[in-house]
Image: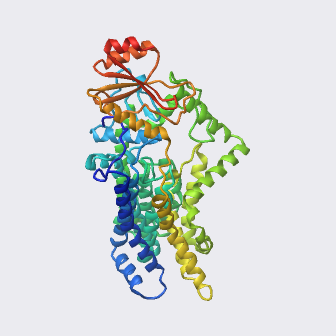
Amino acid sequence: MTGGLWESQEVFTGAEGPASRAVLSWALAILGLVPAMVLMVGILRPKTCWLRSLAHAVSRPAWGAPLVAALVALLISGALTARHAVVPYIHDEFAYLLGADTLAHGRLANPPPPEWSHFETFHVLMQPTYAAKYPPAQSVSLAIGQVLFGAPIVGVWLAFAAACAAVAWAARGWLGPRWGLAAGLMAAMHPAFHIFKPFTWTQSFWGGGVAMLGGALVIGAWRRLDRRVAVPAALALGAGLSILIATRPWEGAVACLPVAAGLIARFLNDAPGRRQFLFRVVAPAGALLLLTVAALARLNVAVTGQATLLPYVLYEQQYAAAPIFIFQDAPPARWSPHAQITAYHGGWSRAIWAKQRTLKGFAAVAAFKMLLLWNYFPGAYMALVPGFFMVYRSPRWRRLALVVGFALIGTLCTAWTQPHYLAPAAAAFFLATTAAARRLACVAAPRRRAGLAMAAAGLLASPVFLMFGGLILPSRSRPAWADQRVAITHDIENHPGNHLVLVKYAPLHNINFEWVYNSADIPSQRIIWARSMEPADDRRLLEAFGDREVWELEPDRGVPKLTPLGKGEEAAKRIQ
């Protein structure tokens, strides 16, 4: 990566110009959305017709609904990226990309670069190793895209497609083949996953596709194990739990509490089958979990030097001035030599945590969190609200409601909430939503037409929102500095040789606009980004990278100002 994780994700390099990109975008969207809408109509048809027969034919094979849901997800994701290339600009995105680049280099961690303090940035460890703080599964998906396709965003699409396929598989166990197909298509076409910026799961690098995959496997296995003890379902359970441990361990653990309670109750209530349950469920699922824990312990040793010390925890110990959970006490304030890092952790983060320590503040922030999550998940399905109340009468569906409810409680316990925090329970939400649509579609006369209309409005709202928000009225919805940074990167790349950019922030720099991120192998990058510190510190940095052309970047001048400083001694003399 020449620019240190700065490249826009130009997957469709053959489409040059806005017109050709728009044509390609519409073509991919039509290929994905039109068949999906046709199948949705066939699922809703109360009487036998060719549309209903088509839906039956697609969903009858066990692999049919997952395959269709995955293809629709891939086509929609590709259509939106074809319209606007994906550019990272959230702190977390760069950290996940660093993790992916590290794995793509065949390493679990990187040695700290020379004069490492100049490269300190958000969510990235510099000591004892140079590595991202986050659990590895999201970075694994990005690394697959980077290694196999030359673009990490393709890994995002593949993970999301796999998650939608898993939702269809899980729903087949709860709802049957035809409505299992509907659930997978609803997940694939859910508008917020594609166009709710900056929280999209397919057009960013910090989404929840991998965690949704894990949650879907757990939910699908739960229903199948309720019916029959079988090793394949146990392996799906173990795989899902393993994915959750390696993506969102806290939210995954909380969301899975009802699942654990249900499986324990099944074990206790079936005395003759306990031995079979232990050998066919606990043993295979436990084996997968042990392998995952061993792999994570190996990662911990590589990054932190201790098998039980998570990179996330070590980063919090080194930098954080606010705890993860609102019920924890704050650690002592930590001061960084970089004002932006201190302002982020000691100012913004600590203020949000402190606000929630009072009842009034907690209520206000909790209301904001619930509004955000409501708009992100059920906001597009208001027509199905009566169906939710009908479905809730069934004990079977109340169990899924518990999964979503526990996940919500888990997010309320943390100081911050993003929609992908709820990804472990996303499959449960889509299953409940599809069940609500099915219940409305099956309402008896004389309200049958009204029920069908509400079910159709709920199921077909997603493609309509997608077409308007993603294609007819598309918006980049990213700050201007993200595009300015890409333009500056390309400008520097047009100069021969290797380069070092000293980023000189103004005192009131916006902490969300971070320029200093690098790839896994900093010394080999064509362009290295570093924080400007005191003149003496900057000169030592220049000595460590003396063969590079040096630039000074002042990003807070309205239009970022890039000044060439020359090489070696010439650059050292011009540093002030």
Above or below — where is 107 with respect to 502?
below
Residue 285 appears in view: no
2 vs 166, nearest the viewer: 2
Image quarter where the N terminus lies is top left
Image coordinates of residue 533 in percent, x first then y, are 46, 19
Could one spot residue 501 in this view of the protein? yes
Taking depth in this image into account, of 529 and 494 the one nearest to the observer is: 494
Report the residue at 42% width, 39% height from top: 94
Residue at screen point 40% across, 32% down: 304
Residue nearer the viewer, 109 or 70: 70
Q: Is residue 560 left or right of residue 22?
A: right
Residue toward you, 247 or 328: 247
Measured along the vertical axis of the image, is residue 444 above or below residue 5? below
What is the quadrant of residue 515 in the picture? top left
Give the tally of numbered discs: 0
The location of residue 493, given as percent across then percent down, is 31, 33
Instruction: Note whether 389 is above or below 151 in the view shown.
Output: below
Q: Residue at x 51, y 28 (%)?
A: 557
The picture quadrant where one finds residue 166 is: bottom left
Residue most extreme to the right: 360
Q: Position of residue 242 (x, y in %)?
A: 40, 52
Q: Position of residue 7 (x, y in %)?
A: 35, 40
- Figure quadrant of the C terminus: top left
